[in-house]
Structures are given as C-alpha cells and as structure tokens.
Amino acid sequence: ARISEDKKYSVHFVFCAILGRSETQECIFYNANWENDKTNRSGIELCYGDKDKRKHCFATWKNISGSIEIVKKGCWLDDINCYDRTDCIEKKDSPEVFFCCCEGNMCNEHFFYFPEMEVTQPTSNPMPTKPPLFSTLLYSLGPIMGIAVIVLFSFWMYRHHKLAYPPVLVPTQDPGPPPPSPLMGLKPLQLLEIRARGRFGCVWKAQLLNEYVAVKIFPVQDKESWQNEYEIYSLPGMKHENILQFIGAEKRGTSIDVDLWLITAFHEKGSLTDFLKANIVSWNELCHIAETMARGLAYLHEDIPGLKEGHKPAISHRDIKSKNVLLKNNFTACIADFGLALKFEAGKSAGDTHGQVGTRRYMAPEVLEGAINFQRDAFLRIDMYAMGLVLWELASRCTASDGPVDEYMLPFEEEVGQHPSLEDMQEVVVHKKKRPILRECWQKHAGMAMLCETIEECWDHDAEARLSAGCVEERIIQMQRLTNIITTEDIVTVVTMVTNVDFPPKESSL
C-alpha cells in the first residue's frame, strides 16, 4: 500500500484485470473471515443474477494507522451507485469502513480512495478597494446580521428536531433516492431477499459485511410502530439471549418517500409458525423451545432495578404469537416484534393506549370483550393467555405421544378458519368459552399431560388464575426432569427383564 500527500492510494493483488467492460461476469474474491465463514480465502468469483439485472464487483477495506486491511471482495448485486464505473473508488471523506463498487470483469482487483473535496477556484480579477463608508457599515452591521442568522438557525433546528423522528442508532444517508443496494451509514448493507411480510411491513435477509442481518422495513404511515420498537429495544437491560438482538434503526429515502428500517440479528430457521408448518418436533426440542420462550417472556415482564445501564421496567408485549417467536439454530427461542409493547415504570402511567390491539386469534377473552383493567398485571396476563395458545401449537406438532401428529393448524383454525373477524372470535372464545382441542393421546405421555395442564392454566378464562411466565418456565423444567427420570427407569426395567430371569421384572413407573 502507498499513501501519497493528497490522501490518494491504491491497493492491489497480482491478478490479470480486464477493465472498462460494461458487463461483469467475474470478480476478484477475498474474505478476511474465511475460516469462520468456511469459504476460500481468495480467488475468482463467478457472478450470477437475473438477466435484466446488472452485476458489479465490490471491495471493502479498513485503514488502520496507514495499514490497509482488506475485509471482503466479490460480486455485488444490481446497484445504481455502481453503474458505468470502471474503477473501484471510495469517495467518502474518512469513512470507518471503506467501500467501492464497479462494473467490468475483475474491476475490483485494484481499489482507490479519492475523497471528494471542495476546491475553491481563485478569481482572476482583484477585488476593488472598498470606500471607508462601506467598511464602517460592514463592521457595524456584520455582528448584528450574524446574531440574526444564529437566532433563525437555532429556531429552525428547534422546529426540525421537535417534528423529527427519534434519534437513530445508525447514521442516516443524506436525503436522496435510496439505491437498490443501500449502504447503512458507513457500512455496506445489501438487501438479499424478503423472508416475511406482516402487518407493519416486510422483513429482508440482508448482508452487513461478513454477517447476515434482518432488516424490517416499515412504510412511513406505520412510524409509530417503528418508533415504539426502537424505544423498547433501547431501554436498559434489553440485551437478553431470549429477546431478539437489536442492531440499529434509521430512516431511508426522501422527505416525501421515506422508509423506516429496523436492523436486528438474523435467524435462518425463522419464526416458530414457519418452522412448525414444515417440521415436527421431538419432546426434548419442544421442552427447549418452550422453556427458552417462557424465559424470554418472564424477563420481559420483570421489573429489574439496579442494572449497570439503568432500571429495566416491566414490559407487556401485547402481540405474543408463534409468528413473533424466532428460533435460533440450536432451537433456542427469542421474542421479537415490539411494535405494540407497553413499558410500566414505577409511579408513571402506561400512557395513552388502546386496549383492543394485537392479533385477533390470540386475543384474551377480556381483550375481545373490551373489558381490560389498565393495570400492569392485567396486561401481563393477556400475554400469558396468548402463550398458552403458542404452547398448544408446539404440542400439536410433537412426536412424544403414541398418537398421530396433526397437520399444523393455527389456534382456533378448526373453529373460525384462517381469517376470523372480531365477532367470530368473540363468539367462540367469550360466549362459548372454547379453546383448541387437547388430544386424548397427549395424556398418555407423562410430560405431555403436564404440558396440557400448564396450557389450560395459561388460557384460563379468569385472568387472575393464569400462570406467570416464570412459573411456566419452572413447570417445563420439571416436565423434562420427570420424563428423563421415567426414561432411565424404563431402561433399567428392560435390562432387568432380559438378564435377570430368576427374579420378577421391576414394575414400570408408567
């Protein structure tokens, strides 16, 4: 690497580059994190994509005290910022991570840093000498005009911030049309594919440097949900294994056409709904998912003073459902989507809120009736009703009992179909007091029988009789211990029957 006095430098490897072509078929590949990502360290990458999309090459690198460290090189999807660029050039002034893209086979072999700097052109005509009167007026009015400008600017800033969205964690781009593959602040963030659509927008799988992230994009009309999620994630103590990891939030686009982004950790298995549609679960998998889900909700509900970062208030989710429970690769659950969540701080009201919110299918009887007591515990019990329904979904797809495993169905899908109205849910849940069916064969498995009892206590019609999330977590731990003990005793029984013919077999605990 060579750094000249005017901040221009280039870094390259020994490859044969073919520059200046409009079509890109091959790019230089490099991955500094190749061991963790299980890829080659360097080489040539073939670029694939839709025929009507343009393909580019890119490079990212860091400048650490004059030492150039390449982060990644490879193919880049259709991006208007890369059109007709034969050289890979970063033009931002002193970015944290340098990024450039270009068109043409292996055009990212070399990369350059040419910061755009305003150059003042000298004038050829000398400035005429000002008369003494002009100088006097200039010195007299100058300070007054300066103060006026400062006052006007301060007023504009006050108005601007008063009307603006909350501050964002990730620096936003300058106003302008968002490119197809936008950059998140100073770091390259590329949208790859839509993974889910919901009430408040869509969720994309995206790539941020060497890792995948999830980007939830809200339309501007849903800014309250975006703002509420950002504020809940930003509360003290919200970093927890069973709560979705928050990375950043920002606004994209122009003042007329704005998208609101929420960037979080990405989990390939997706939501519990999607997973159960395509898969069945073993008893141990069910226990692990249920336990970690209950642990996350218990932590969310807990009021925790004295944390290093401050006081974590109790939080009611208000939209617990299997779609808002995500699964990590090891089947650990984490709770997501805090667009409707409420925080409860000591001595403060929960603020203006509407009681009848959430997903109709998962609404507790008191929510469907519109008869909510607007106190903290009442909102936490609403979450527990919905959790009972999610536990039923897990039970319906579990292989633990001897009977057949049902096809995946949403709670109450047998009774009200896939798109119930509020009146449908009121009739079934409030007036008829129905709940999803607990199959008889589930009762033949000791752990499943305990789970059925727990589910019934979660969705009890009387809100005050429902279990807490912490109690559900303890129940599930006990269930798993019980079944492990039974399994061990069964093995001893079988061994005794086979090897000890002189003695009667030990009676099974089942």
Image (cartoon, rainbow, N blue to C red):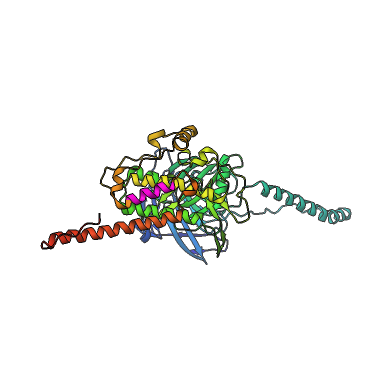
Residue 309 is inside the magenta segment: no
Q: Residue at x 34, y 41 (%)?
A: 408
Q: Residue 421, relative to residue 441: is it above or below?
A: above
Residue furthest bottom as drawn: 65
Q: Position of residue 15 (x, y in %)?
A: 38, 56
Residue 192 in view of the camera: no
Q: Position of residue 365 (x, y in %)?
A: 49, 40
Q: Which of the 4 image quarters holds residue 429?
A: top left
Pick whichever, 260 or 93, lies toward us: 260
Pick whichever, 287 or 379, lies toward us: 379
Instruction: Tell me which segment is drawn in magenta.
Output: 448-458
Q: Residue at x 30, y 52 (%)?
A: 446
Residue 457 is inside the magenta segment: yes
Disc tally is 0
Pick whichever, 6 or 485, lies toward us: 485
- Does residue 338 appear to the left or right of 411 in the view shown? right
Q: Residue 25, relative to residue 239: is it above or below?
A: above
Q: Residue 306, relative to residue 341: is it above or below?
A: below
- Does residue 95 appear to the left or right of 154 in the view shown? left
- Does residue 480 appear to the left or right of 216 in the view shown? left
Q: Quadrant of the C terminus?
A: bottom left
> Does the magenta stretch mainly form a helix, a strand or a loop?
helix
